[in-house]
Every structure is written in C-alpha cells, then in structure tokens.
C-alpha cells in the first residue's frame, strides 16, 4: 500500500476494522502475550494457520479460542510442522512476532521522506486470493487498475493464486518456487 500521509496505519486499520482486529489488539505490549499465554502455544499457532477468512483476524477481548478447541490442519501443514513452529514460539515468546505490528506507525513515520517514490526494479507480485491483505479496502483496485504499476513501473506480472491465503510460500510451495525460478531466469 502506498504511504498515506493523512492517517497512520494502525489508526487506519482500527477505523476500518475496530479494536478487535489483530493489528489493533497487538499494540499494547504484554497484553496479547498474556492472552496467548492463557492458551497453549500450539492452539494459537493452529488458530493462525487454519484461519481462512479474507475479512481478517479478529481477537475479541472476551476470548478468542476455547481451551479445548480442536483444529484440523490444512493439507500443506503437517502436525510435525505445527510442533516445530510451536517449539520455536515456546522458546522465544510472542513479543518478537507481534512487535512487527507494533512498529507499523513508527515505520510509517520513518518512511515518510519516500512518499511517492517509485520502486524501480523488475518485480513479480504474487498474492493469494484468500489473503487478508488482498481484501483491504481499495487494494484490489490499486493492484489491478494502475496504481501499483505507477508506483512500481517495472512490475512485470501480478499473479493472484486461487484458493491460497496468507501463508502462500507454504500453501503452494512448488508453484511459488516455479514462479520465482521463472522470474529469475529472465535475468
């Protein structure tokens, strides 16, 4: 998304989606970590990896997951993979992962001098049609109706993969690898 000098990203997401939107909920240090700490790490991992609602991820303060909720993993994520990811988050905690979202406004401020700058390298953009970021208000028009091409003049191709959500490199690993290799071969 291009830099919008009129509104900070977190304020934008909160105005569109409200206080239960995951980006909104991640802002106060320690709060979401404590909430996730009341659940098993594996439950939280499975919830994120099995979420397929393009409208977004909402984490109500009243409770997000019941402690005995069972998840069916998608075919691209094995129980072994979920266990590996779980162990990594059990070791590191949640702060590192959610700090990215806590820095959205700071990054917005730091990148302000480049408002309107174009990205001038050959580019291929790949997104899943179920990815929540592909459903932000106005983003599809931006991508498909010239705004993206204006900001990235060497954009060679936009690929929208059907039935794919946010974890595109895992969901369609072979297809993504093929896209990357085909693109690199041009150079």
Image (tube, grey):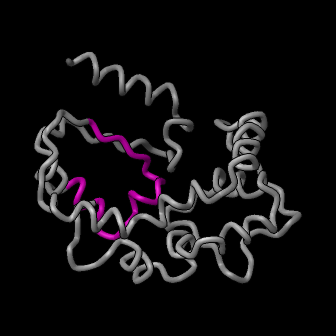
Q: Where 187 sits versus 59, above or below?
A: above
The quadrant where residue 126 appears: top left
Percent position of residue 65, x then y = 76, 68
Percent position of residue 121, x then y = 16, 35
Camera-side residue of 127 and 105: 105
Quadrant showing the C terminus: top left
Q: Where 85 sits versus 150, above or below?
A: above
180 with respect to 37 (left or right): left
**Segment tinted magenta in the rendering:** 124-144
Q: Is residue 130 magenta?
A: yes
35 with respect to 21 (left or right): right
The quadrant where residue 39 appears: bottom right
Q: Where 61 sits versus 116, above or below?
A: below
The quadrant where residue 48 appears: bottom right
Residue at 77 percent across and 33 percent down: it is 80
Quadrant showing the N terminus: bottom left
Residue, far right: 68
Residue at 81 percent across and 68 percent down: it is 38
């Amino acid at each position: 998304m291009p830099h919008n000098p009129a509104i900070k990203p977190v304020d934008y997401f909160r105005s569109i989606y409200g206080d239960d939107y995951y980006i909104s909920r991640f802002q106060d240090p320690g709060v979401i970590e404590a909430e996730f700490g009341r659940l098993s790490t594996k439950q939280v991992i499975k919830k994120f990896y099995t979420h397929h609602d393009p409208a977004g991820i909402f984490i109500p303060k009243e409770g997000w997951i019941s402690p005995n909720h069972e998840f069916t993993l998608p075919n691209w994520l094995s129980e072994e993979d979920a266990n590996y990811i779980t162990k990594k988050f059990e070791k590191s905690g949640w702060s590192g992962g959610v700090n990215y979202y806590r820095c959205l406004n700071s990054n917005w401020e730091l990148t302000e001098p480049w408002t309107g700058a174009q990205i001038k390298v050959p580019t291929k953009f790949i997104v899943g049609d179920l990815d929540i970021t592909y459903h932000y208000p106005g983003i599809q028009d931006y991508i498909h109706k010239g705004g993206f091409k204006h900001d990235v003049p060497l954009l060679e191709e936009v690929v929208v993969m059907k039935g794919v959500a946010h974890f595109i490199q895992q969901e369609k690993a072979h297809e993504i690898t093929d896209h990357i290799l085909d693109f690199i071969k041009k150079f």
